[in-house]
Structure formats: C-alpha cells, structure tokens
Image: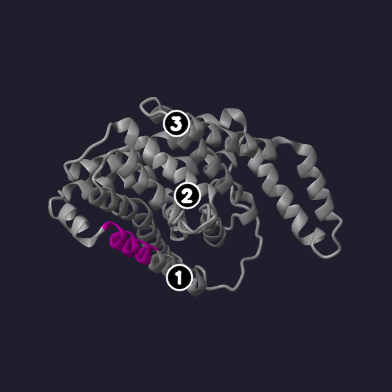
Amino acid sequence: MTGTLRKVLIAMLLGMALYVAYGLYTGYEAIRASLASFHWSAFAAALGLASFNYGLRFLKWEYYLRRLEIRGVPKLDSLLIFLSGFVLTVSPGKVGEVFKSAVLEETHRVPLERTAPIVIAERLTDVIGVVVLIAFGSASFSGGLGWALAGGALVLLGLGLIFWRRPSDALLASLERHPKLGARLAPRVREGVESLRAIATPSSLLLPSALSVLAWGCEGLALQVLLLGFGSSAPLGLSLFFYSTATLAGAIIPVPGGLGVTEGLLREQLFHLGQVPEGVATSAMILVRFATLWWAVLVGFAALALLKARFPRLLTQPSAEVRPGAR
C-alpha cells in the first residue's frame, strides 16, 4: 500500500507542476481574473455530476458481477470496493483499477483472475460510450468524424482480440508449455479470458455501453457547467466533443491518468476551436480535471479508508492466495 500511495502522490505532484506550467504559459493574471468572476456553485455542480458518473459506473460493476454469478457481496461493500479502484485512476489507461479485484479477493474470497476481466470490459464499454458522445458532438463541429472513426476502430480491435479464439488459444497453449509459468499461470489466464468472453458478448455490451454514454456525458456536461460559471459557454455538443476527445486521447496514450495529454488537448480545443478566452480556457481545464480526475482519487482513498475500518487486515498481507470464489 505504501508503494501505491507513493505512486499516486508522485502523479499528483506531476499534475500540480503541469497546472503551474499551464498557468505560467497562459499568464497568471489572466487566470486570476477569470477565477475572480467565477461562480463557485458551478464547481459544486461539476462535482455532483462527476459523482453521478461514479454511481452509473457502479451499476456496470454490479451488472458484471451478476453476469459472472458472483453472489454474497453486500451492496455497501461492493460500492466501497468499486470506489476503492479510483485510488489508481492515475495509472496508464486506468488499468490500475484492477486493484478493486484484489480488494474483492481479500475481503470476500473471490479469485482476482475471475473479476479482473471486468476492468477490460469496463474500459471497452467506456470507449464505446465516449465514441458515441464524440459522434454526437461532431454533428456541430467539422472534423469530429475522424475521432469517432478512430474510437470505433479501437472498439472493433478490442472485440476482435477478445473473440478471435485462434490467436488467444495459441498464446494460451504456448503459455501452458512453458516449464516454469505453465502450471501456475496458464489456468488463471485461461479463466480470465473465459470470464471476459462471458461479460463482453454483443448482447451484454448494450446496457453497460448505454450507462457509459450517460456517465461520461455527465462529465462532459460538467465542463459545460463550469464554462457557464465563467460566463462563457459553447454549445453542449461542442462541450461533449471537447471533453470526450480529450478523454479518449488521454486513454489511448499510456501516461498516468492521461496527464498532459488530456489537459493540453482540452485547453487547445476550448481556446482555438471554442473561441473561449485563453485565461478562461486554462481555468476551466484545471477545474474540470479537479472535479473529475482528482476528485475520483480522493473518493477512492475515502472508500479504501472505510473498507480498512470494516476489514482491518485488508492489504496487510504481502500477497493474496487464490481462494474459492464466492457465489
């Protein structure tokens, strides 16, 4: 846990340094003037929209647990376990959210390899939701179709890798033949792949993808609310487009939490394409990242603290053993 905390703190310091750099680039006075007239109730509303996003994504988590026939996890524990994954939101591609599978294993004896594929399914449906929002926003902005096509290609690639059995079975067979790793890892990897196929069928993608559209739409709306708080606005379609394309770019490029990539693209789009004043564009970018990315990290640590109070031995063991799954 100490190593995890150290990595998150490093990412936070990197983020703060990045925002200071943007402030120096834009001009401190321009940012100060924009914040002086900002209505902070808009920031509270943005936090509320981001929190609603988490609620919708929790429904996806519960849906996937039911698809895998994992029973006996109280709803409060399930919610706290889901939110604890936000501690590693700043991991590249958010793959660190598999942390919640490790927590579920320690608290309710559900083997990690059984639920870890949920993280991949979540990311896949998140990409689908973001691509839908980009397509919607591109209707009010020329050039948006290219981003929608790029996102669509990622979705098709992901589905192909999941359901094209020949290459995956060949890789698994190769792993099974390995003298040292075969007996220990191959059964767990095979179970993980089969779990992923069970929760990522075309029919099982419909509801989670719809929830993703609503969830990420809330964060795009949060950007619109913040712009209104500055007295500056762009059409809702553009706000959704700007936020979604920046989010997609940050997810594609493997940097922690999309740091630098998401911020830079979002600010440039607001300033150059949305005609938002430069100081306001920088301030809105920083505030929306605090209301979404960094708020999620704080929520994750709060959830983890509550879990530690309920399960004092949580994360105290050097490694977790594979145990029979709860049903």
Tell me the residue at 51%/73% (across/down).
3
Q: Is the magenta stretch mostly helix, strand or loop?
A: helix
Tell me the residue at 59%/47% (across/down).
327
The amino acid pointed to by label 3 is Gly
Tell me the residue at 31%/64% (across/down).
20
Left or right side of 162 for 81? left
Which contiguous range is marked in magenta? 15-26
- Which residue is under mark 3? 143
The amino acid pointed to by label 1 is Leu
Asked whether residue 208 is in view, the answer is: no
The reply to whether the C-beta atoms of the residues labelled 1 and 2 are less than 8 Å apart is no
The amino acid pointed to by label 2 is Gly
Asked whether residue 191 is in view, the answer is: yes
- Which residue is under mark 2? 250
**What is the x, y in percent for residue 74?**
45, 50
Q: What element carries label 2?
A: helix
Does the segment drawn in magenta span residue 19?
yes
Q: Nearer the viewer, mark 3 or mark 2?
A: 3
Q: Where 64 sits versus 177, above or below?
A: above
